[in-house]
Image: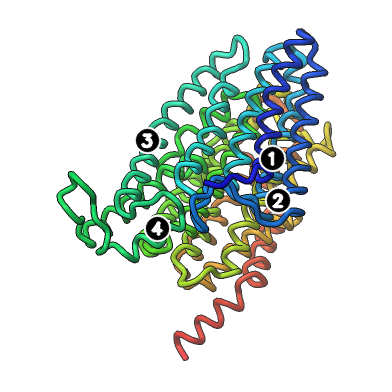
């Protein structure tokens, strides 16, 4: 086995940051500033190491048993993923400054756990076998259980942490069962071996004690079942249905900076893992894995949007919106996996939507933290008239919500929504594109309702479920939606109609 130590430098820096946070807290007990500064410098070092080694140094690999049997690689794509994760961790640390100053959370343990989560995230982007992938995902997730419930005297945080932990354990068990079935069917854990193993099912010998060679049809069924279980288990990380129930309670019970990091980093980690499994390992069972992701996408966006319509708390609304966004993320991913080849448009849709979602979701949480503090997001009614009190923060929140809804002036979100639908139309998944478009329209209802609340005149008791949207706002939203449909994917619909009826 060959090990390129240079390929491990970003992971070393991330793990060293966690140790450094504990050491600084031990040397200068009770001093929060040095611990936060040391942690921030270490996270910035992760970005520098990822750029310098992954982008500047080309393709490097570690733990290699053969040419295509490396457990960890560091290439430009893995370096970019590591840099984005480090940026999210830095942002979460910055949002946590008010929380850490109050003493509600021990600074040394908080920074240590955040850096430990970053270590798993850095490894995740370069994982090339199932063992490394699952271990990296759990390293990313495990510290978050403690971060959710770390706040002193917060019973809601403890309840949220337990909910998060229980659902995560079940989902991890499902993913591990799927990985075991995939290994049984193909005889390998590296993505290249899994992809190649399916092509040689009939020549594989089950080994001593297995009753001879396992039939090709039986192994094919095992592989399909394993891929489905693996994808469903990984769906927990993106808060996709059916592993979604933890998200609202956990986001609402956790400190808001932790919720911001959890809603973005966990989602990004889940998308990366599904992309690696679906494209690198599961392309031999395209119909099974692609259909699984498509079903998860439809259920997630539909359930998330319908439940979000009834939410009265801001963080819970963002949580259910996050469940719906998981559906939008999985839709082009399912089409990409089921495609005959890796279509650049589908890849761009998956990567682009994930990138814009991470930025917009984190911006929304940052605005909520700036308005309400790091402890609690409050009721939506508490934000009534915010535009008069805090116009700049209102602008940030409105831009983030508009982007998540896929409307101008949130051009990033509009581009992402249009890119997803266009990619689905181009990838022969018209029915899925229609479902995405319908759900995007449903999502407008609660995003616009929150926006109307921000600009409504202050008053006493407010029933946010019956806030009336001023007709100019409603008309503008309707016109913007029609323009987005016509400009974004109108030509494809016309061409498909012409091809069908002509």
In the picture provided, is 18 more to the left or to the right than 302? right
Residue for point 83% across, 33% down = 390
Residue occupied by mark 1: 10
Question: In this rendering, is residue 130 above or below 135?
Answer: below
Question: In this rendering, is residue 56 above or below 246?
Answer: below
- The Cα–Cα distance between marks 3 and 2, rounded to whole angstroms, is 32 Å
Q: Are marks 1 and 2 in contact (CB under 8 Å)?
A: yes
Residue occupied by mark 2: 54
Judged by depth in the image, the label closer to the viewer, 3 or 2, is: 2
Residue occupied by mark 4: 289
The disc, 1 or 2, on the residue closer to the chain's N-terminal end is 1
- The Cα–Cα distance between marks 1 and 2, rounded to whole angstroms, is 9 Å
The disc, 3 or 2, on the residue closer to the chain's N-terminal end is 2
The disc, 1 or 3, on the residue closer to the chain's N-terminal end is 1
Q: Secondary structure at mark 2?
A: helix
Q: Secondary structure at mark 3?
A: helix
Residue occupied by mark 3: 173
């Amino acid at each position: 086995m060959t090990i390129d130590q240079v390929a491990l430098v970003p992971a070393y820096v991330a793990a060293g940051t966690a140790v450094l946070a504990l050491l600084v807290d031990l040397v200068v007990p009770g001093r929060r500033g040095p611990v936060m500064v040391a942690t921030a410098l270490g996270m910035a070092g992760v970005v520098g190491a990822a750029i310098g080694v992954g982008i500047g140094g080309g393709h490097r690999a570690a733990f290699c048993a053969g040419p295509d049997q490396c457990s960890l690689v560091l290439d430009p794509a893995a370096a970019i993923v590591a840099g984005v994760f480090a940026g999210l961790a830095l942002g979460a640390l910055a949002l946590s400054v008010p929380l850490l100053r109050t003493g509600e959370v021990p600074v040394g343990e908080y920074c240590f756990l955040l850096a430990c989560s970053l270590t798993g995230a850095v490894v995740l982007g370069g994982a090339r076998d199932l063992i490394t992938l699952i271990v990296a995902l759990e390293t990313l997730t495990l510290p978050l259980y403690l971060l959710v419930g770390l706040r002193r005297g917060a019973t809601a945080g403890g309840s949220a942490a337990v909910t998060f932990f229980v659902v995560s354990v079940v989902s991890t068990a499902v993913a591990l069962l799927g990985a075991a079935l995939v290994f049984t069917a193909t005889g390998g854990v590296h993505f290249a071996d899994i992809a190649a193993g399916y092509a040689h099912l009939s020549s594989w010998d089950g080994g001593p004690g297995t009753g001879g060679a396992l039939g090709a049809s039986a192994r094919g069924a095992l592989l399909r079942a394993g891929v489905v279980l693996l994808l469903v288990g990984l769906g927990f990380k993106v808060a996709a249905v059916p592993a979604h129930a933890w998200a609202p309670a956990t986001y609402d019970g956790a400190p808001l900076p932790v919720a911001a990091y959890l809603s973005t980093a966990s989602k990004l980690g889940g998308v990366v893992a599904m992309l690696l499994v679906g494209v690198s390992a599961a392309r031999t069972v395209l119909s099974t894995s692609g259909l699984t992701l498509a079903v998860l996408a439809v259920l997630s966006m539909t359930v998330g949007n319908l439940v979000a319509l009834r939410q009265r708390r801001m963080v819970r609304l963002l949580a259910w919106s996050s469940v719906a966004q998981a559906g939008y993320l999985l839709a082009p991913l399912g089409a990409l996996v089921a495609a005959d080849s890796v279509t650049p448009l589908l890849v761009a849709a998956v990567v682009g939507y994930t990138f814009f979602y991470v930025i917009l979701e984190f911006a929304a949480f940052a605005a909520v933290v700036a308005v309400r503090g790091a402890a609690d997001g409050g009721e939506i009614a508490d934000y009534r008239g915010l535009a008069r009190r805090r116009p700049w923060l209102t602008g940030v929140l409105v831009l983030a919500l508009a982007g998540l809804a896929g409307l101008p002036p949130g051009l990033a979100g509009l581009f992402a929504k249009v890119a997803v639908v266009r990619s689905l139309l181009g990838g022969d998944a018209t029915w899925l594109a229609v479902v995405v478009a319908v759900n995007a329209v449903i999502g407008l209802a609660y995003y616009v309702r929150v926006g109307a609340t921000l600009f409504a005149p202050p008053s006493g008791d407010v029933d946010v479920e019956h806030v009336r949207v001023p007709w100019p706002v409603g008309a503008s939203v309707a016109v913007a939606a029609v323009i987005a449909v016509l400009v974004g994917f109108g030509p494809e619909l016309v061409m498909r109609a012409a091809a069908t009826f002509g």
